[in-house]
Image (cartoon, helix red, strand yellow):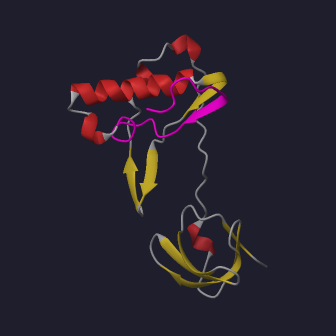
Amino acid sequence: HNAKGLEFKIVFVAGLEEGLFQHFRSMDDTAELQEERRLCYVSITRAMDKVYLSCAYRRNLYGSGSFNIRSRFLAELPEKLLETSQTPTIQPVEVGNFTVGDVVKHKQFGQGIITEIDDEKINVQFEEHGPKTLLLGYAPISLVE
């Protein structure tokens, strides 16, 4: 690893879930698992002031959802050093509020018109960014009235 010796005021370590960090290929290989444990240790010890460790109970990857278990590396940390929060970072959007033809506003893509609604996906033709397919339950969109 190339992080040895570098220090940062704040360090973020995301994806501390079984099968992600540590990687699923290293779960049955003791040497690989030890290397990932060392990498986790190095990432944590690079923080001068604060380190943020995060894991997701549910993660959407490539359009499909998965439920996750916290990485065993988190359980190995001294509990007295941890301050935990289980606040969700994304709130699902009410899906029943949209119909084809509605004008919506997206935080990143701006204003657009809904062209299609599927069970979990919504297609929007944005004025400046063209057509986009978004996950309906998590798209940061609102109706323009």
- In this view, which residue lies farthest toward the left? 28
Q: How many marks?
A: 0
Q: Which residue is at a point 58% across and 71% down the rendered structure image?
A: 96
Question: Residue 12 in the image: x percent, y percent?
Answer: 59, 35
Q: In which quadrant is the C terminus drawn?
A: bottom right
In the picture as drawn, the residue positioned furthest to the right comes out as 145
Instruction: Say whether residue 127 is visible.
Output: yes
Q: Work out whether 89 lies above or below 13.
A: below
Can residue 72 be seen here? The reply is no
In which image quadrant can residue 37 be found? top left
The residue under the point 60% across, 51% down is: 90
Specify whether 99 is left or right of 17: right
- In the image, 130 versus 64, the foreground residue is 130
- Quadrant where the N terminus sits is top left
Front-lying residue, 65 or 46: 46
Please, what is the dominant secondary structure of the magenta stretch?
loop
**Looking at the image, residue 133 lies above or below residue 56:** below
Q: Which residues are magenta?
A: 1-22
| Towards the viewer: 112 or 1 | 1
Measuring from the top left, give residue 25's x and y in whole percent.
25, 40
Residue 133: x and y in percent read: 52, 75
